[in-house]
Amino acid sequence: MKIKTDEITSVIKKEIEQFSQKLEVSEVGQVVEVGDGIARVYGLSKAMSGELLEFDAEGGVITGQVMNLETDMVGAVLFGEGNRVREGDTVRSTGRLLEVPAGPEMLGRVVDPLGNAIDGGPTIKASASMKVDIVAPGIKERQPVKEPLQFGIKAVDSMIPVGRGQRELVIGDRKTGKTAVCIDAIINQKKYWGTADAVVCIYVAVGQKESTVASVVDTLKKHGAMEYTIVVSAGAGTSAPMQYIAPYSGCAMGEWFMWQGKQGKTPKHVLCVYDDLSKQAVAYRELSLLLRRPPGREAYPGDVFYLHSRLLERATKLSNENGGGSLTALPIIETQEGDVSAYIPTNVISITDGQIYLQPELFSAGVRPAINVGISVSRVGGSAQIKAMKEVAGTLRLDLASFRELEAFAQLGTELDPASQRQLDRGARMVELLKQGQYMPFDVIDQCISIFAGSKGLLDDVPVPAVPKFEREMLENFRGPNKALRDQLADKKSFKGIEDSFVAALKAFKAAFRAS
């Protein structure tokens, strides 16, 4: 029998060609142990730390991420419905890092940490994706923070100013109004939407009750703030891995907008609220224990500094060469019984550029927002204020700190000299002036006029209970009969040259107010 070598050769060639087309090389392992959102996988010898894994579970593929690299196994966390993964299931390495969808399609939506819609709306078809965990931009890619990010809260914008690209910690006990301060800041960005100064807001809820998140979303909708906001929710009922990655996912979604400035597009400014990082640290502790990480620097509590610093370092004001975009971070930390010297609070205080401390005693006394100006600080300061605010609020913090000391002294029943009594009277009126209703942000020009009136002593003889009414009617006056003067201040952003006109207008208004 004669063998036709040409035919055999052609068949082998054809088979090789088809084989190379169909061949898919991927490293495959098996689940050895699974439970509580954690899986131990055998056989992935080339897996990288942080690599995305695909688990062939019942009902479809489940994603996970490598967290531990051991001698013969890898420890992975499971995202989504981890209870569908069983022992013996096949696991494939992808060679990719975890990514989330990003882009304008995300605005106005409530999503989980993987970017899936959870608001009952249509599936999100995002135009871009961003890596969840990246290295923060270096010094050369940044520039100093110098543009104000207005909160619309008089006490914050005057004494603890926050700039675009800053990291400002919001810290305090439970139920002291931490979330309310941040929601006010988000609502206040509405006036900039549609302009070159537009700010995209991202609210990340970690370990919150679903009802609390729904209430926040309703508030944002009611004030027309959802059109420029993304809500990332990892509720109290979600797994620890989802709560752990939620802040990073929110930050990644914001970074897409921040880098738009490099392409000459807007919006390029972002505000990220992480509510709260204490619960993220608790979720991370759970993962550390389940992965059996040794209790040293690479596990809870040692690694919590790295956990939060690699998130907050991503907040930045980019250089003009990179488009000048910014990402401002407002991490929230809950303290126990006012203990700001505990491990996690001191960690985050050392990472951030200042803190807004909300005090339970002030909250109970009816001072809302309950900001303690003695402990609260902004390390950016006047760079993040308009000129007019710098002119009127220069000594406000010291005056209020002196008032608090004097108030404590006066409670002893000591007789005060006339100068001290005057200081006490003015301090009481300034405290009343800085009180503000929830979800009622003030325009920065209105804030300047109010603080100007108080610092010039024009409220010294107005009864304390009448201060809110005086302020309300005074601001109405500057939007009516004295609108031209207010417009001058809005244009110049400084009281220089028009200070006397303002004093005269305020005295005339005060006389009319008294008469009425």
Image (tube, rainbow, N blue to C red):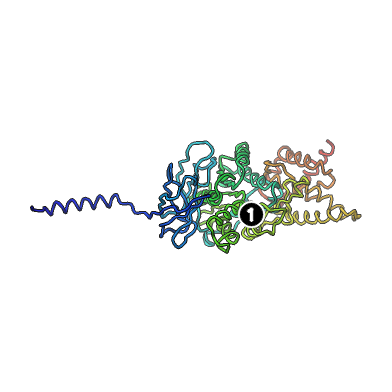
Q: Tell me residue 83's x, y (percent).
A: 49, 45
Q: Tell me residue 294's x, y (percent).
A: 55, 62
Does 21 appear above or below 475?
Answer: below
- The residue that label 1 is drawn on is 168
Q: What residue is rendered at 43% in x and 41% in y?
A: 59
**Quarter of the figure that contains the C terminus:** top right
Nearer to us in this view, 316 or 277: 277
Q: What residue is rendered at 83% in x and 53% in y?
A: 407
Q: Note whether residue 330 is visible.
A: no
Query: Quick one: which residue is furthest to the left in this view?
Result: 1
Q: Note whether residue 5 is visible.
A: yes
Mark 1 crowdedness (10 Å alpha carbons): few <14, some 14-19, many ≥20: many
Relative horizontal placement of residue 481, taking residue 64 as reference (left or right): right
Does 297 appear above or below 408?
Answer: below
Nearer to us in this view, 337 or 221: 337
Nearer to us in this view, 80 or 314: 80
Q: Tell me residue 313's x, y (percent).
A: 56, 58
Tag 1 secondary structure: loop
Q: Tell me residue 7's x, y (percent).
A: 14, 51
Nearer to us in this view, 267 or 291: 291
